[in-house]
Image: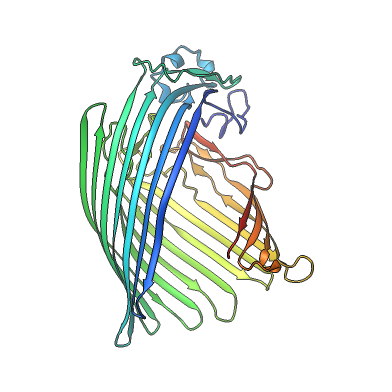
């Protein structure tokens, strides 16, 4: 939804309701997902253990959707003839719209095989992991996109949702998008975790081969990309007798993108480096766990929403993020447990021709949470757990240009759970989870001026877990 009417009021001072529908009356969406796999491990002896995880997944999605991409006064609609025909006073409350007819079939196969070896060299104990993993992905997209002026404007003062003819497909303001995207990635890795007295050292390396091919069936062109990359990670911990464990770690990442651009072009892989220094406190005589860390992360070739309002992503620049993470868990008594956390994030584009120095959208600087629960062990309520807590999310920028901010919000959650061990079913329970207990209305985030999301309304979820 647009920022007008959500983050900011419309020109008449009102906001859109949380159940506002910017689409057509006959919008449809369906999804069919299949998944099969297994997890296997076998311990040969005290030294060797082999593990393998395999999974195949297939997702089929189909949609006919009209969607908004900003009010007419938004620069994204500068070329809309419908918007240009409006009086200047009306451009702030008419929503420009486009449409998509899309059928996709995504298949993904992955397998990871790992050998764990435990041995000692003198006074040093080792846990050595060696392995190989393989991933194959195929995404077949058959879509038709409407461009500027392909859908009538919507008056936000008096919105009327009508049916839309998704079969019209006027070539004057719409066109096909048919892409077959195939990707393969193989990685070999090794990691050694060595402990000598109170010193724990971890060192690992990985080499990846990634091949990707994108066939644009409309233009009859093919884009190919082959990448190879070595990455490594390392860390050192010192285990003090009083439960304090300071640590330092360094890690690198290599992530080929599974997405392609609107022309079927393949995006360059994202590469990252992270330094982290922290401390963990776990005293033996008290049920407390406290962790704290500071980190610095850089990541290249980040994807962002197309600022021109298309359905696709575009390559962004390098992002640097640094921050602080703190978490504490404590059992104040046999019945009372408390968990609290706080994160501070300072992120910005450090290498970008357009957004250098700006903060990425949807990245709040401050986040915090607090949760407490009470479990009854005696009396008629024995086995019952009651819990409640709050989640705070600070303000964030709503677009890469940092032209507006989304306000902070706090929501309260609650839990009621009953342990069925009290009736002879150990390991089983029934529970009722309530998210956003007081049904607060808030904007969760925006990725651009035309892409804002209301936060989830009150949700009540009942679960039952049985173990035999």
Which residue is drawn at the image coordinates 45% and 30% (left, top)? 63
**Foreground residue, 126 or 93?**
126
* Quadrant of residue 194 within the rendered picture: bottom left
Which residue is drawn at the image coordinates 46% and 71% (left, top)? 279
Q: Is residue 132 left or right of residue 61?
A: left
**Foreground residue, 107 or 359?**
107
Which residue is drawn at the image coordinates 40% and 59% (left, top)? 38
Tell me residue 239's x, y (percent). 44, 79
Residue 267 seen from this side: no
The relative height of residue 319 versus residue 20 in the rendered view (above or below) is: below
Tell me residue 431's x, y (percent). 65, 56
Q: Specify the quadrant that holds the C terminus.
A: bottom right
Outermost residue, bottom direction? 122
The relative height of residue 179 versus residue 182 in the rendered view (above or below) is: above
* Quadrant of residue 276 within the rendered picture: bottom left
**Foreground residue, 170 or 292?**
170
Q: How is the image coloured?
A: rainbow
The relative height of residue 173 versus residue 120 in the rendered view (above or below) is: above
**Foreground residue, 391 or 190?**
190
Outermost residue, front direction? 468
Residue 157 seen from this side: yes
Tell me residue 309's x, y (percent). 40, 29
Tell me residue 233's x, y (percent). 31, 65
Q: Is residue 308 left or right of residue 85?
A: left
The relative height of residue 442 versus residue 111 in the rendered view (above or below) is: above
Which residue is drawn at the image coordinates 58% and 41% (left, top)? 455
């Amino acid at each position: 939804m647009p920022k007008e009417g959500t983050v900011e009021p419309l020109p008449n001072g009102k906001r859109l309701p949380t159940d506002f529908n910017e689409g057509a009356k006959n919008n449809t969406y369906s999804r069919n997902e299949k998944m099969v796999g297994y997890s296997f491990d076998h311990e040969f002896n005290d030294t060797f253990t082999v593990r393998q995880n395999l999974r195949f997944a297939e997702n089929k999605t189909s949609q006919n959707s009209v969607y908004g991409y900003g009010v007419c006064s938004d620069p994204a609609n500068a070329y809309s003839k419908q918007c240009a025909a409006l009086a200047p006073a009306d451009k702030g409350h008419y929503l420009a719209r486009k449409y998509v007819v899309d059928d996709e079939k995504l298949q993904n196969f992955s397998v990871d095989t790992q050998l764990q070896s435990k041995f000692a060299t003198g006074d040093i104990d080792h846990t050595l992991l060696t392995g190989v993993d393989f991933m194959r992905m195929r995404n077949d997209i058959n879509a038709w996109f409407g461009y500027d002026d392909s859908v009538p404007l919507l008056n936000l003062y008096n919105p009327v949702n009508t049916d839309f003819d998704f079969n019209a497909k006027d070539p004057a303001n719409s066109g096909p998008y048919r892409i077959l995207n195939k990707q393969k990635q193989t990685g070999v890795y090794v990691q050694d975790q060595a402990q000598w007295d109170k010193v724990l050292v971890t060192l690992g390396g990985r080499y990846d081969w990634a091949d990707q091919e994108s066939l644009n069936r409309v233009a009859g062109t093919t884009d190919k990309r082959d990448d190879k990359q070595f990455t490594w990670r390392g860390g050192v911990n010192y285990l003090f007798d009083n439960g304090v464990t300071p640590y330092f770690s360094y890690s690198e990442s290599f992530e080929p993108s599974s997405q392609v651009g609107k022309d079927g072009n393949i995006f360059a892989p994202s590469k990252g480096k992270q330094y982290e220094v922290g401390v963990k406190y776990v005293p033996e005589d008290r049920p407390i766990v406290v962790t704290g860390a500071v980190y610095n992360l850089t990541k290249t070739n980040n994807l962002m929403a197309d600022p021109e309002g298309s359905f696709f992503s575009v390559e962004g620049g390098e992002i640097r993020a640094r921050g602080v993470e703190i978490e504490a868990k404590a059992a104040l008594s046999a019945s009372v447990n408390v968990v609290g956390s706080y994160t501070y994030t300072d992120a910005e584009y450090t290498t970008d021709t357009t957004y250098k120095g700006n903060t990425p959208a949807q990245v709040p600087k401050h986040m915090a949470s607090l949760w407490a629960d009470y479990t009854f062990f005696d009396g008629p309520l024995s086995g019952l757990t009651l819990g409640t807590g709050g989640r705070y999310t600070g303000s964030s920028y709503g677009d890469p240009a940092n032209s507006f901010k989304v306000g902070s919000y706090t929501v309260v959650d609650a839990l009621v759970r009953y342990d069925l061990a009290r009736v002879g079913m150990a390991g089983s329970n029934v529970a009722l989870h309530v998210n956003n207990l007081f049904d607060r209305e808030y904007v969760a985030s925006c990725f651009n001026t035309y892409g804002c999301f209301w936060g989830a309304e009150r949700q009540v979820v009942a679960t039952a877990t049985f173990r035999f």
